[in-house]
């Protein structure tokens, strides 16, 4: 009986075990945060697993080889199982090698974890460290360029059966495993449960009324997102405003560059593609002037007059210029009802955020990588660092034109199926 009680305690089983379920519910209801939400489950635990240093393992092996009994040597060194001792004897050579290597793990022989598919990880890390010593703003795309150039045969074989993104992920795993990190801080104000509840409430009330009042093709969504010539978020070149309807109708993107109205950037805009609307703002952000004059009374008015004379509805977030009284009146003058989304719910209610921004930015990254690789390969006689620096030294005007071209191409790649799924996922 005592042995049974001991085993029950070892497994964490006690009277009132049902309380664990209550703790789970409480933890789940209190959880909040952006991105991944991790739930802690109070599962029965066998306790902390015993670990032994490589030096201890080697001492035990030497004592056994000197004539000691396995059971006695194990007990005297507080080793709980003889099976482990036999395993250590079998791996004696590897234990000696691990003890001799000061940089190796103190408790393992190495070789654990996910196998690295990239055979030149050490060379890649040395190159990364050399670039970082010179304070070069290194990104994953640069590492991809290095691998494709220095190990072109391996990269070609790898990409025969895999996509470009797979190579990017493999390189990121190598960097992460060697102490480098790629992180972006995020936060949310309300919990996941509250967010989903608000989505259901808004969809059932406001969304249902909009569906009754307007045909499917007459409901739109507008939003902004920052896009960069480079992936470094410290240099913001433009912000894009865009709209699309529940029937997969897309307006051409509106690109807002940082600049002074009436300045040289605005005067040079005639050179940009006619598939995009380009304007400037002092900080490169959407404000009341751009929203009302350029978008509502410009792009939206032209779209309504040319294609949609029927009454329309447009969902927007709670940015002040989006929901101002002036904006509501301007939309109303073009037969459009402005429908603000509840605060802090765009992650689940805004179709653009739910299912469009991700694929759009993924395509932008792919286009950027493709252009960078082509430019790097064009001047193969120069050192790679010089070619990378040449990309960064391009004039601002060249970067703006390239960015506009990428936005147009990436936006055109968003197909009807992607838009339809985004509206369905948002419940609108």
Image: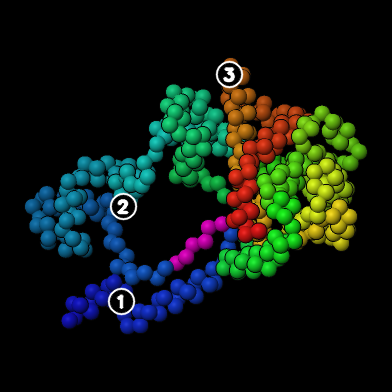
Range covered by the magenta-colored residues: 35-40
Identify the coloring: rainbow
- Dominant secondary structure of the magenta stretch? loop
The residue lying toward the viewer, choosing from 89 and 102, is 89
Q: Indicate which disc, 3 or 2, sits on the residue closer to the N terminus.
A: 2
Residue for point 33% across, 50% down? 106
Position of 218 with respect to 132 (left or right) is right
Report how far apart the C-alphas of labels 3 and 1 lie in the structure.
67 Å
Front disc: 3 or 1: 1
Position of 383 with respect to 14 (left or right) is right
- Label 1 crowding class (10 Å Cα cut-off): few <14, some 14-19, many 20+? some
Residue at numbered disc 3:
380
Q: Looking at the image, is 238 positioned above or below residue 343?
A: above
Asked whether the residues under the numbered discs 1 and 2 touch, taking CB atoms below 8 Å apart as contact, a structural biologist would say no
Note whether residue 399 is visible. no
Which numbered circle lies on residue 338?
none
Position of 39 with respect to 417 (left or right) is left
Which quadrant of the figure has residue 68? bottom left
Q: Is residue 37 magenta?
A: yes
Q: Position of residue 33 (x, y in %)?
A: 58, 63
Q: Looking at the image, is 133 positioned above or below residue 326?
A: above
Residue at numbered disc 1:
13
Report how far apart the C-alphas of labels 3 and 2 lie in the structure.
46 Å
Which quadrant of the figure has residue 42? bottom left
Residue for point 60% across, 30% down? 370
Residue for point 74% across, 46% down? 242
- Label 3 crowding class (10 Å Cα cut-off): few <14, some 14-19, many 20+? few
Which numbered circle lies on residue 107?
2
- Label 2 crowding class (10 Å Cα cut-off): few <14, some 14-19, many 20+? some
Position of 127 with respect to 44 (left or right) is right
């Amino acid at each position: 009986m005592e042995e049974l009680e001991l085993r029950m305690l070892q497994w964490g089983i006690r009277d009132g075990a049902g309380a664990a379920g209550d703790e789970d519910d409480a933890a789940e209801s209190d959880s909040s945060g952006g991105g991944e939400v991790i739930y802690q489950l109070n599962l029965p635990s066998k306790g902390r697993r015993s670990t032994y240093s490589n030096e201890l393992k080697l001492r035990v092996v030497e004592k056994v080889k000197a004539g000691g009994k396995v059971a006695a040597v194990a007990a005297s060194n507080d080793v709980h199982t003889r099976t482990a001792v036999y395993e250590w004897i079998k791996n004696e050579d590897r234990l000696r090698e691990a003890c001799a290597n000061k940089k190796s793990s103190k408790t393992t022989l190495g070789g654990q974890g996910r196998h690295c598919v990239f055979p030149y990880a050490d060379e890649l890390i040395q190159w990364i460290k050399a670039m970082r010593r010179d304070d070069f703003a290194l990104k994953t795309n640069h590492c991809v360029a290095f691998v494709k150039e220095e190990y072109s045969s391996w990269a070609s074989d790898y990409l025969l059966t895999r996509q470009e993104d797979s190579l990017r992920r493999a390189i990121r795993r190598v960097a992460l495993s060697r102490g480098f990190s790629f992180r972006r801080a995020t936060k949310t104000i309300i919990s996941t449960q509250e967010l989903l509840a608000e989505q259901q409430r808004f969809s059932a009330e406001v969304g249902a009324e909009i569906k009754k009042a307007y045909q499917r093709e007459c409901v739109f969504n507008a939003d902004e997102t920052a896009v960069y010539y480079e992936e470094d978020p410290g240099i913001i070149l433009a912000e894009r405003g865009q709209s699309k309807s529940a029937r997969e109708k897309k307006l051409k993107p509106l690109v807002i560059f940082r600049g002074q109205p009436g300045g040289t950037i605005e005067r040079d805009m005639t050179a940009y593609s006619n598939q995009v609307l380009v304007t400037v703002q002092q900080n490169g952000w959407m404000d009341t002037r751009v929203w009302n004059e350029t978008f509502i009374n410009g792009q939206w008015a032209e779209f309504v007059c040319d294609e949609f004379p029927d009454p329309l509805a447009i969902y927007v977030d709670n940015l002040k210029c989006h929901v101002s009284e002036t904006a509501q009146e301007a939309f109303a003058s073009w037969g459009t009802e402005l429908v603000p989304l509840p605060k802090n719910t765009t992650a689940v209610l805004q179709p653009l955020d739910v299912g469009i921004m991700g694929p759009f930015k993924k395509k932008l990254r792919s286009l950027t990588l493709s252009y960078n690789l082509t430019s790097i390969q064009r001047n193969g006689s120069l050192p790679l660092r010089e070619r990378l620096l040449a990309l960064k030294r391009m004039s601002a005007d060249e970067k703006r034109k390239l960015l506009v071209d990428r936005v147009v191409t990436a936006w055109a790649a968003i197909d009807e199926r992607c838009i339809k799924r985004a509206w369905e996922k948002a419940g609108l």
